[in-house]
Image (tube, rainbow, N blue to C red):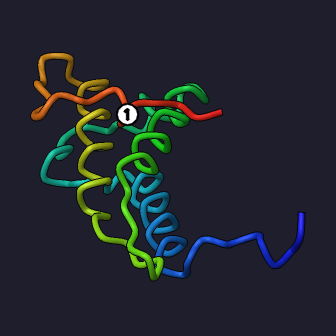
């Protein structure tokens, strides 16, 4: 593989990913939806839960041709909905998750 063909995530994508990880670890992911839930034990108790969180975020995240993030808030909200279900099984996700949002890529 030629180095010239290897791309990198844009600065905007890297910043969005970094802030998402900060909010997630800090317990401040979507405070409106997750207020009153200390979700960190549910998310960090196993690698598979954390893996699913990052899969949803990266599957939902959209970027334009210039590498600018178009929907960071939406991607974080979809993760927050999944986390809420983990903490509150009575919560109804609207709209329901589609398979592509939850897909784990190898």
Residue 75, position as x, y percentages in the image:
31, 53
Please state which of residues 100 and 4 is positioned toward the viewer in this rendering: 4
Q: Where residue 58 sits in the image (x, y, percent)?
A: 46, 50
- Work out which quarter of the rendered image holds the C terminus and state it: top right
Total numbered labels: 1
Q: Which residue ends up furthest to the top in the rendered image?
A: 89
| Location of residue 28 with respect to 105 vertically, above or below | below
- For label 1, the SS is helix
Residue drawn at 25 percent across, 62 percent down: 73
**Label 1: how many residues lie within 10 Å, few (<14), some (14-19) or many (20+)?**
few
Which quadrant would residue 19 be assigned to in this image? bottom left
Residue drawn at the location 10% of the way across and 25% of the way down: 92
Q: Residue at x 42, y 28 (%)?
A: 42
Which quadrant: the N terminus?
Answer: bottom right
In the picture, measured across the screen, residue 85 lies left or right of residue 42, that is left
- Name the residue tied to disc 1: 100
Relative to residue 63, is residue 81 drawn left or right? Answer: left
- Counting from the top left corner in percent of width and height, residue 103 is at 46, 30
Q: Nearer the viewer, residue 96 or 25?
A: 96
Position of residue 83 relative to residue 59, above or below, is above
Picture layout, residue 101 above or below residue 91 = below
Q: Position of residue 60 (x, y in %)?
A: 35, 49
Please report the residue visible at 29 percent of the width from the left and 33 percent of the height from the top.
Answer: 82
């Amino acid at each position: 593989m030629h180095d010239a063909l290897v791309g990198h995530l844009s600065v905007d994508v890297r910043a969005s990913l970094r802030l998402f990880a900060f909010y997630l670890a800090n317990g401040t992911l979507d405070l409106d939806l997750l207020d009153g839930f200390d979700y960190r034990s549910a998310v960090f108790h196993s690698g598979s839960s954390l893996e699913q969180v990052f899969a949803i975020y990266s599957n939902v995240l959209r970027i334009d041709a210039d590498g600018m993030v178009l929907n960071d808030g939406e991607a974080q909200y979809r993760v927050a909905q999944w986390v809420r279900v983990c903490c509150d099984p009575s919560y109804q996700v609207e709209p329901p998750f589609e398979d592509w949002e939850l897909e784990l890529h190898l």
